[in-house]
Image (cartoon, coloured by chain):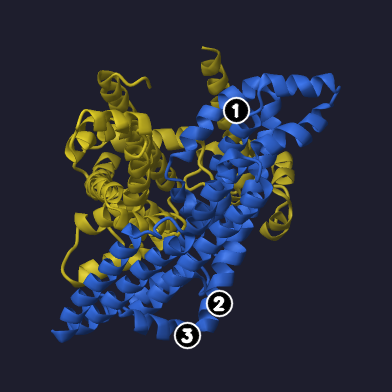
Amino acid sequence: MALVLLALVLWGVGWWINARLANGPQAGSRAVGLLVPAIFGVTILVVWELLVRGLEVPLVILPAPSLIAVRFAASLSILWQDFSQTILKGALGGYVIGCGAAFVMAILVDRSDFLRRGLLPVGNFVAALPIVGTAPILVMWFGFDWESKAAVVVVMVFFPMLVNTVAGLRETDQMQRDLMRTYAASYWQSLVKLRLPAALPFIFNGLKISTTLALVGAIVAEFFGSPTVGMGFRISTSVGQLALDMVWAEIVVAALAGSAFYGLIAMLEKTLTFWHPSQRG
Amino acid sequence: MKSLVAVLTVLAGIIGIWYLACVPMNIKGVLDAAERGGEVVEPAEAQTRRDLSSLALAAQNGFAVTRVWSVERPRLPAPHQVAWELWDTTVMKKVTSKRSLVFHAQVTLSATLLGFAIGTGLGILLAVGIVHSRVMDMSVMPWAIVSQTIPIIALAPMIIVVLYSIGVQGLLPKAIIAAYLSFFPVVVGMVKGLRSPDHMQLDLMKTYHASKGQVFWKLRLPSSMPYLFASLKIAIAASLVGAIVGELPTGAVAGLGARLLAGSYYGQTVQIWSALFAAAILAAALVALLGLLERVLLGRMGVKA
């Protein structure tokens, strides 16, 4: 009981510190902007730990963060194997193929107004569908190994990326295109020097949406059949064995991989589209 | 009008490619079946056929090409097979029958809608809190944004088993996954919407001596509606994905996800495809319904769509 009380007190203290910081004179500074969510996150972890111990929540319902950390440290090699199977091979492979294919397709489609008119609504429609459902079909076609996971990821990221790139290629206005014309620029010159740079914010939007989709696709596809390695496989078998600390360790890996992947693309965006108003502010 | 023609052309093209793709995908199965049925197949041994490319096989066995569109368990079913299966399992079967897709769709739909309601309700509440409290904004908002980059769906099997072990089963676990997936898009969109009134408008409310509640009900809430609907459309599609994925790990017996799983266990490809199309139709209908609601509501509010 004492632990539960301590948890409540700590929650109050954490909130109080945050309230002081957020309403204090330094509230606008960058340090506070990082400190406040950090304190919030740490408070949640501590309260979680204390509540699980204080209320003696069984392991099969919710393991304490310390247990998850111990499990994480103890099974680094398994986690690494799963990571490289699911993320590096499945998700990343599919991501590169899918986004690349969508990019090339977008440039081809952009050349024909008729095709663009027809494909854009269809692409928008498909992008809203539950495409993860194609996983069982693709697993059947490409086998249990990472190729089928990559195929699911390709299908999932293709349409969001296509729609965004096609929209981005329309971003230049008449004036700019006319300017290129007065320079006697060829199609390729105006594509590379004007229209692709102008499309970059849209392309990066598509790339960022696709990062999460890629991880989701690779993990969910493993629920339909996989070799005995991989994050989705480990999650579903560990759930079966009620080894929830292992499941949480995998989820930590997924969360870290997802944020790092997204962060990487966002960083790339920042360096490549430094000129765009949304990046200057 | 011109766009409609273009869209239809693209759709026809996709269906055409689909029919063509059936030839290389199914030709080997067709030839094996024809050989078992005592017909002369070129080349005769199954071993040599395996090493040949599908297109070469199709060229050498012209008689078999027409059969690739009517295989019992094809690797790739032809569009009309899927359409027939859809028709057969929705219209021809009683809706209460276990073999009716309407029955399965309704199971998934109820989990989706329940989860969507929970997720959006909580999401809107959290967004209101975030807009009105600086502390909540600074502590929760970064995490809400980071959480968008995480494949939350990895949690699905665990949520189901944990809830099962404390005695909760049936609709609720799936609805919780659906709620979880629809929660964050709504939070992020709604916060953006509630912040969308500009300084001028807020100042005007101030000169009217409007209370915080009045500012909320008369200015912030109405101006957040376009943002809310944009994120609701994302959220309901996410809910449906959540409900379908939620049916996978438990070996559920009912629902579109269960149809997918059963189809993949027993190699019933036509069943998988029809469940997939049913899910797609459901998603499209839900998004279209929200779009209609948006147009009616925003129209009555005088917002230009």
At 52% across and 82% down in the image, what residue appears?
Answer: A76
How crowded pointer 1 is (Cα within 10 Å; few <14, some 14-19, many 20+) is rated as few
Q: The chain shown in blue is which?
A: A
Residue carrying label 3 = A73
Residue A83's tag is: none
Q: Residues within 10 Å of mark 2 (few under 14, many from 20)?
A: some
Q: Which residue is mark 2?
A: A80
| In this view, A278 is above or below B201 | below
Residue sitting nearer the eye, B36 or A68: A68
The correct choice, above or below, for A5 with respect to B236 in the image is below
* Nearer to the camera, A96 or B272: A96
Given the image, on which type of amino acid does mark 1 rest?
Answer: Gly
The Cα–Cα distance between marks 3 and 1, rounded to whole angstroms, is 53 Å
Which residue is most to the left? A1
Nearest to viewer (mark 2 / mark 3): 3
* Nearer to us: label 1 or label 2: 2
Q: Is residue A188 left or right of residue B51?
A: right
Query: Closer to the observer: label 3 or label 1?
Result: 3
Residue A235 visible in rendering: yes
Q: Are marks 2 and 3 in contact (CB under 8 Å)?
A: no
Residue at the spot x=60%, y=41% of the render?
A201
Q: Is the residue B201 above or below the residue A241 in the image?
A: above
Q: Earlier in the sequence, mark 2 or mark 3?
A: 3
Look at the picture and state if A87 lies above or below B24: below
Chain depicted in yellow: B
Which labelled disc corresponds to residue B13? 1
Residues tagged by mark 2 and mark 3 found on one chain of the structure: yes
